[in-house]
Amino acid sequence: MDWMSVTWLVMAWAQSGVTQAAAPPPPPPPPIVAGSAELSYVGTSGNSDTQTLGAGSTLTFRPGDWTITNKAALVRSEDRGQVRAQSTLIETQVGRHLAPTLSLVGKHGYARDRFAGINHRNTAEIGLSFEALTTARQQLTLDAGAGYASERRRTGANLSTAIATMGVFYKLAVSATATLENTARTVFSLEDGRDRRVTNVASLSARLNALLSMKVTHTTRWVKSPVPGFMKTDTITGVALVAKF
């Protein structure tokens, strides 16, 4: 072996070491138990006397290859002491890792939404979730599933139908203290093409300290065939104080 070959080998070895040293470390594993609680309030007085209260909580438990997440959210609006609108959402999701980036997921959701004329809505579904991108700064998750939905409406005919679902979740660390998240979800009826709905939730969080954050959230809900007498689109914008544990 001549000196030129030795030189090339040494340079290649050195370059390999530099590349390995420069590679960013993998993100740390998520905690076994994590949760959050948030509260928002908007009030007016004078020409109008209204109060709007928003509250939510999330609790996640990760025993081994399983992930169990429970979510609850409430929005309540009063005008001069009378409840004008209220929405309640409760969701339980259980996931089991089939591969490092692929999970089998089962969900059950309950919703009561006076904003949209829905007295009760129950959904149950099962599907797959794929972690398309996971880095220290970004996360992209895609999911698809099928199930059944039962909806009791204030007016018009109630709904009971098989459904198909698709969802996209994206998370971006904008800075060391700010995080942007967006969740888009579409639900199709497999029996009635007119029954289609889309929900999009976008939020920007800024950490105040190790425990507290401020979060601005904008939620858009669209239903192709709404309850008679109600509009197709609802939007909710709120600013909340969030505590994480």
Image (cartoon, helix red, strand yellow):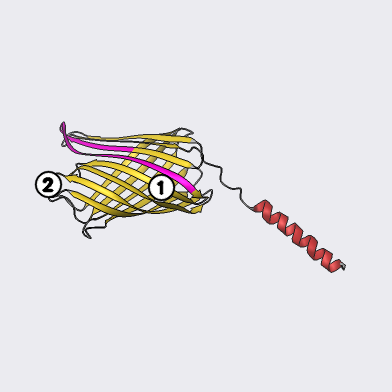
Residue 10's x, y, as percent?
80, 60
Of the pair 243 and 209, the residue shown nearer to us: 243
At 37% from the left edge and 38% from the top edge, which residue is drawn? Answer: 70
Depth check: give the residue in front, 186 or 81.
Answer: 186
Placement of the C terminus among the 4 image quadrants: top left
Could you say which disc has been placed on residue 105 in the image?
Answer: 1
Identify which amino acid the numbered label 2 is placed on.
Thr
Query: 183 or 177, which is in the foreground?
Result: 183
Q: Which residue is mark 2?
A: 155
**Foreground disc of the pair 1, 2:** 1
Q: Is residue 42 left or right of residue 33?
A: left
Q: Tell me: residue 135, above or below residue 11.
A: above
The reply to whether the C-beta atoms of the residues labelled 1 and 2 are less than 8 Å apart is no
Q: Which residues fall within the magenta stretch? A: 72-97
Farthest residue, direction top: 81
Could you tell me how far apart the alpha carbons at marks 1 and 2 are, in whole angstroms? Answer: 33 Å
Amino acid, disc 1: Val
Magenta span includes 83: yes
Residue at image location 38% in from the left, 42% down from the top: 93
- Tell whether 119 sits left or right of 4: left
Name the quadrant of the N terminus: bottom right
Q: Position of residue 180 (x, y in %)?
A: 42, 48
Query: Tag 2: Cα neighbours inside 10 Å, few (<14), some, or many (≥20)?
Result: few
Closer to the chain start, of discs 1 and 2, is 1
Mark 1 surroundings within 10 Å by alpha-carbon count, few (fewer than 14), some (14 through 19), many (20 or more): many
